[in-house]
Image (tube, coloured by chain):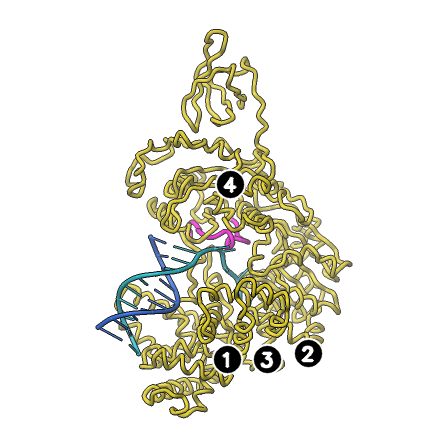
Chain colours: A yellow, B cyan, C blue
Amino acid sequence: MSDILSSLNPVQLEAVESYQGASLIIAGAGSGKTRVLTCRIANMLAHGVPPSTVLALTFTNKAAAEMKERITDVAGERARYLWMGTFHAIFSRILRYEAENVGFTSSYTIYDTADSRNLLRAIIKEMKLDENVYKVNDVHARISMAKNNLITPQSYASSGSISANDTQARKPHMATIYAAYARRCIAANAMDFDDLLLFTNILFRDHPDVLQKYSSKFSYVLVDEYQDTNYAQYLIVKKLTSAHRNLCVVGDDAQSIYSFRGAKIENILNFQRDFPECRIFKLEQNYRSTQSIVNAANSVIAQNSGQLKKKCFSAGEKGEKVGLLPAFTDQEEGFRVAGDISDYLYGAQAPYSDFAILYRTNAQSRIFEDSLRRKNIPYRIYGGQSFYQRKEIKDLLSYLRLIINHNDNEAFKRIVNYPRRGIGDATVARLEELAAQANLSMWDCILGLTPEQAEIRGAAYKKVSQFLLMINAMSDNAGRQEAYELVSAVAQQSGILAELRADKTIEGIARLENVEELLNGVKEFCERYQEENGEPPVIAQYLENVSLLTDADKEKPEEANTVSLMTIHSAKGLEYAYVYIVGMEENLFPGKLAMMSSVELEEERRLFYVALTRAKVKATLSFAQSRYRWGKQESNPPSRFIREIDPAYIDVTSMSLDEDSFSQDPDDYTEGYYQDGLPRFAPKASKPSLARQLRKLPDSTAEAKQDLPRLRPVDFVPSQAGSITVGALVEHKSFGRGEVLAIESAGGDIKVTVNFKLVGKKTLLMKYAKLMLVK
DNA sequence: CGGCCCCGCGTTTTT
DNA sequence: CGCGGGGCCG
């Protein structure tokens, strides 16, 4: 233990050692945050704190697993008894014990986003509301926000300001939808992701004895990524710690990028208000990146208001300046980035896994996939369609869900006629509505109905009954059969395997493979569980585990030597030697919508900060003058964020659109690339130069003028004519940089010929033209 | 009841 | 452009 502590810097060490009381650890990017957290917990264990009294909350399963592993390395087996996991996983575990207190049973289902939306769609339809007004995604987002802020359907309906808001938005039935949704979730014995936090709060509010039990059980609470907590999470933490006040929160306000999902940056900004006695530790030394990268990132984030004060620095190498890769089109952007990567691969002898391409939106990935493929560079895309959201996986999991919880309506609807059993949509919809009216689940509703009462055809009724019998038979085994055995039997008996095997299309084969992969996953889970608990798991245990899993937990980035492609959001917490931040254009990054409010613009800026600080050795920004979006061509000026980087840390000379750096092979470009017939790499004469665009405010954004900070790169001091010599590098205000090719006198004036990188050769008269000597 | 086509829609997403 | 949902038709 002590040799581990000796590797910490003074602030880190202090943060590790003072584990009593409240602490706020402000952890800059790359400042060894995870090390501090793991050491702190390991240190607590070394001081005799029993592991089962420690609660450590994270946002991702991955973060929790990583931390647990690292603590196990130091503290050994005892680490197993720590309560460490995501908010959702930990409190869902507690809710399983306490379910009856909030009107559920312990075998409640966890609805994922798709389940929630399907249910909402059904409700909106039944209420005969206009689906174009009550858009499922919007309705879901609004309900989610309400839950995150602990607004129950009752308080939602009775709040004047909310109903005024909804009326103004021409959605007066929001409260009714919310109430119906909540009622039907309860009837289905199901909680959505937000419910896990909402009902934990309700549990603690209505059952002080239960709160007392857990708040005394957990003598120490730690929260990672505290800047991402929402109100519901904040309150849970506050309640659990109000007695012993041993709370340690770790986070970085500069990296708060999830407010669109309800995260409240105020939670970290105002931590001292709830815990005035807290000690504050600032981890300001960045061990990840070069000075140039850290300083560039600092200069960007400095433009935001209201932050926790800190001075991040790197003691590492000065390093290369942030690079720029301008391009005329998105195709070319892809080509230049791929080209740059292969240059670096060759020059720096770096493995593929040292490179990442980060973009603002998933739609941007395609271009880079193409360009990398063309160069035979292996890549891997992270995010996107989740494994667990694939239809075939959801279908099989729905069987498992229904086996455990017969009231799980969403699972029921999904599989009652899959594989096909001749039960039609009409029958299903009819049953769903009947059940809703009786405030029952479809399952219970069917059990209590004769075919006449149900008003469905006898044949359909019989088929539904057969389905219930089959599920019942499967349920009989669920409690005693080992999970893997049961899942394979279900895959077989349900007819899913037969259905997929019959499908000989490429997609069909892929689906079958996915199901097989899931079966393998179950097997692995069983083996691990057996090892840890000394007995095989039943299906409920697998399902509990899998409902809160995402594909991010399946993937092991370290394993493959490939270039990584992902959104900036999913790159948070990761690091790469070489990082390309692409699509650096107004309306894309920052996004169009974000530019409308300064609050959202600041979040975009933090997102850019996150992106920059992923880089260890070099960050490169690319942008395209025009790109295809949604099938249409679009032109946007370079992102304001480029200009916000202190010019000392960004390499503006790399702006050059040097013809030699492009492939002359037409095969490297897609067809139609040169369709406008313009010379390849020369910008249109009428367009301002790229350098100029970087210095100029984009006219297209009306708000930009007041909203943008003043430009800093314009320390333009014209040099004396005599100081300029042939071969010198000079800068011109609008033409950018170039090399002096010739100097000659011309009737009382001096004529200078400069080869500008952006616009080519120009001859200037020193009497008029202002040139600044750069080198 | 099931398949096909057309129309509308389109930040980010740890759970 | 690429997907998903709803509507229509066989």
User: Position of A509 compared to A442: left or right?
Assistant: left
Is label 2 in contact with label 4 (beta carbons under 8 Å)? Answer: no
* Picture coordinates of residue A266, whole percent (x, y): 66, 56
In the rendered view, would you say A557 is above or below A333?
below
**Disc 2 marks which residue?**
A207
Q: Is residue A548 magenta?
A: no
* Picture coordinates of residue A225, whole percent (x, y): 61, 58
The magenta segment is: A559-575
Q: Could you tell which of marks 2 and 1 lies nearer the N-terminus? A: 1
**Disc 1 marks which residue?**
A188
Q: Nearer the viewer, mark 2 or mark 1?
A: 1
Do marks 3 and 4 share a chain? yes
Residue drawn at x 48%, y 39% is A638
Residue drawn at x 40%, y 82% is A430
Q: Could you tell which of marks 2 and 4 lies nearer the N-terminus? A: 2
Is label 1 in contact with label 4 (beta carbons under 8 Å)? Answer: no
**Disc 3 marks which residue?**
A99
**Disc 4 marks which residue?**
A618
The numbered mark 4 sits on a residue in which chain? Answer: A
* Picture coordinates of residue A455, whole percent (x, y): 38, 88
In the rendered view, would you say A179 is above or below A713?
below
Do marks 3 and 1 share a chain? yes
Residue A215 sits in quarter: bottom right
Residue A498 sits in quarter: bottom left
Residue drawn at x 34%, y 87% is A457
